[in-house]
Structures are given as C-alpha cells and as structure tokens.
Amino acid sequence: MTRAELEAPLREAAERFVPDMETVLVRQDLAGPPRDKPWGTAHAVGACANVVDGPFGVANGDDLYGDPSMQLLADGLSEDAHSGVLVGFPLAATLSHHGGVSRGICRVTDGWLDSVVETHGLVATPDGDVADGAGGRYAPDATASMNLWGLPASAAQRMADGFERFLADGPGPTDEYLLPTEVANMMAEGLTIRVVSSSGAWMGLTHREDLPEVRAALAAAPD
C-alpha cells in the first residue's frame, strides 16, 4: 500500500531486498474520493480487496517490528485461516523517553483478544508502572497493540464495503476509517483473534526527539 510519490522508491526497495518475491503495490490515493489526509488504515486494507486471496497481515509503514515479530505474524496466519492474530508488545517497551504516546491497550483472556482501548498520554512512572493522561495506571507488561494484525481473507472485502458506508455517513475532512474500530465490529459478529506476545524490539517515531535513538538502533542492527 502506497501513494504516488512513494511508489517508485518502494519498487526499487522491493527489487533490492526481496527480488524473488512477487510484489504488488496498491495506491491508496487512487481509492475513494481524493483528499490530502489519507482515509485511514481500514480504507487501505479495503483498497487491497481485489489482490488479497488468502489470510493477510497488516503492519504500519512507519514502524519497525523486527524479524521475530514478523515471524510470529506469519506463523499465526498459517495456523487458522478463519481466525485473526494480533502480535502484541509489552507496553513499557513501546514508550518514548520524550513525552506521552498513544497506544492500544489490550484486554486478553486465555490468549484471546477481548478488546483494544486506544489510550493517550502514556508515560513511564518512577515506580515502574505506566500512567495515562487521565490518571489510569497499567502494568509495564500489559499488552499493547502496535497494529500488527493478521486477518482472514474476507476481512479485506468487508472493509471495502464498510468504507462505502463510512462515506455515506458524511465524514469530516479529518475523519478516518480506522482498522481497530472495524476489527472490533468484526469481533462483535464472531471473529476471534489470538494474541501472541513478541519479545522482539519495536522501533518507531512518536516525537522528533526519538529520531537519534532510532538511527542508533538501526546502525547497530545486523545486516
């Protein structure tokens, strides 16, 4: 999934790093009415409905999840074509040293996802817990969703259809058709999602000040 200005660099990267893998690029900016702000991750998934022919993974393009996490996703997709899988991370491992972050806090029962609650202003506390901007507190090993999902093939077409309903409701100029919201709707209708915890390192940019740490981690990573 890409947009016009990134299509050529992505093709070049695919030819360089995965030359033996078939690569299909879908332009999100060509799907749906044009606007400056993308329509959201669920819209991106729905735009791929015509090229998805089996269980598939969804990952944020601006996060680095690492090989262990991607392997967990691949293993989860191969186990059950009808259920979903969420690769979760310990909450404390996803925080920034430079300010609060927003994360999806997962409620999990016996390895199965009950819900994901988007929670804002999360920071580490001096006693080792994690606090949010509303006074809530969480264990450092609480499961956080970083949008690394595996979903059954039918989910892509469902999101394509759901985006049409989203448009019919008259969204505002910054409203997004969100993946966690649509996954929650699918769960309410019976979709089950297994949660697997990753010990792999996650890297991402929330604050500008995070950039030196990410660069240092990338420079230290093996080729």
Image (cartoon, rainbow, N blue to C red):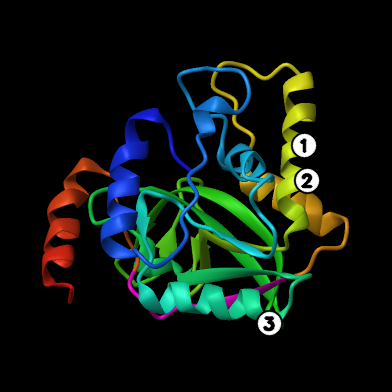
Q: In this view, does 155 lie above or below 167?
A: below
Q: Where is residue 171 in the image (x, y as percent from the top left)?
A: 67, 20
Which type of secondary structure does the marked residue at label 1 adopt?
A: helix
> Image quarter for residue 110?
bottom right
Q: How crowded is mark 1: few (under 14 residues within 10 Å), some or many (20 or more)?
A: some
User: Residue 161's image quarter?
Assistant: top right
Q: Name the residue under label 1.
A: 162
The residue located at (46%, 70%) in the rendering is 89
Span shown in magenta: 193-201
| Residue that appears at 50% across and 27% down | 29
> From the viewer's perspective, is 192 left or right of 148?
right
Q: What residue type is labelled 3?
A: Glu
Please tell me whether mark 2 sits on a helix, a strand or a loop.
helix
Q: Residue 206 carries which label?
A: none
Which image quadrant for residue 219?
bottom left
Image spot of residue 127 (x, y percent): 33, 71
For mark 3, give the secondary structure: helix
Cα distance between the residues tagged 3 and 2: 22 Å
Q: Mark 3 points at which residue?
A: 79
Residue type (three-letter) at the residue carrying disc 1: Gly
Q: Can residue 71 be seen in this view?
A: yes
| Label 2, label 1: how far apart the Cα atoms are | 6 Å
- Nearest the eye: 122 or 189: 189
Q: Is residue 196 magenta?
A: yes
Disc 1 from disc 3: Cα separation: 27 Å
What mark, if any, has residue 158 been given in the picture? 2
Examine the structure image and report whether residue 80 is included in the region drawn in magenta: no
Residue drawn at (50%, 50%) of the image:
24
Is residue 206 in view from this perspective? no
- Type of amino acid under label 2: Arg
